[in-house]
Image: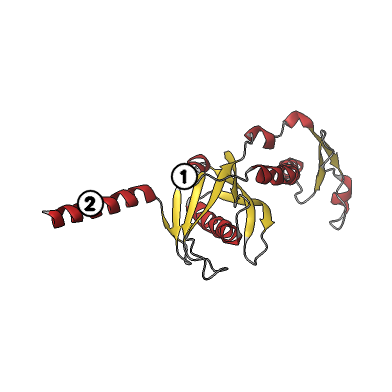
Amino acid sequence: MNTIILQITSGRGPAECCWVVAQVLKYMIDEAKKANISYHIMHREKGIENGTLYSASIQLEGRNAESFSKQWTGTILWVGQSQFRKHHKRKNWFVAINRINFSNEHFKINDKDICYQAIRSGGPGGQLVNKVSTAIRAKYIPNGLNVLVSESRSQLQNKKLAKLRLYELIKLEQINQQKSKLQTEWKNHSEIQRGNPVKTFYGSDFKVRNNETNYKCKRRSLKHNLRKELLE
């Protein structure tokens, strides 16, 4: 399963760009759900205005995560009137989506690094609970993280569940370790390319138009044909 991390950044732009970052994040989450891609918001850098973000980082996992990320990586354009400065003449606001270099191997656990220990279950359940060692303690040797599982009367089932829970615990710790890296990445992405947006959104309702270039070409073509007809 592919694991992708994308960072949406305002590039230290004004409040309008920070608003766009927050809207893009919401839109991307909705699209990820439609594509059966699981997501985890790893980092948010809040903007000055309510409902705005300087940057946001999202982890995507799923069979279609790779192709999905390619559709989003690049410059995003929002065309609309500033809601923070009503008389501001500017209508084009740019943010960027960058892919964070990240190896899928980072989230893999080597079974040789897990130590299992069978112990007696505690709590109610009669004499059988105290005499049979069905509970399993799983410990990840590299960092000392461990879990104790005793839900099942089957030692094998408890072992499987312990491995699963240990994996989630390790993954959560690794994600937390990435947060400082993501903050550094955001600071490095202060420049945003303006032009050739991969996606263009319009208005306060944030409607999308994926291919702005073709739209402009068609508009120019219509104007050219109209002028030609008038001259004839």
Question: In front here: 190 or 90?
Answer: 90
* Residue found farthest to the bottom: 86
Mark 2 vs 1, N-terminal side: 1
User: Mark 2, mark 1: which one is toward the viewer?
Assistant: 2
Quadrant including the C terminus: bottom left
Q: Position of residue 66 (x, y in %)?
A: 51, 39
What's the amino acid at mark 1?
Gln
- Indicate left or right for 229 with 218 as reference: left
Q: Residue at 76% across / 51% down in the picture? A: 151
Q: Is residue 41 visible?
A: yes
Question: In front here: 123 or 7?
Answer: 7
Secondary element at image label 1: helix
Q: Position of residue 132 (x, y in %)?
A: 85, 44
Q: Is residue 109 above or below residue 131?
A: above
Q: Position of residue 26 (x, y in %)?
A: 55, 59
Circle count: 2
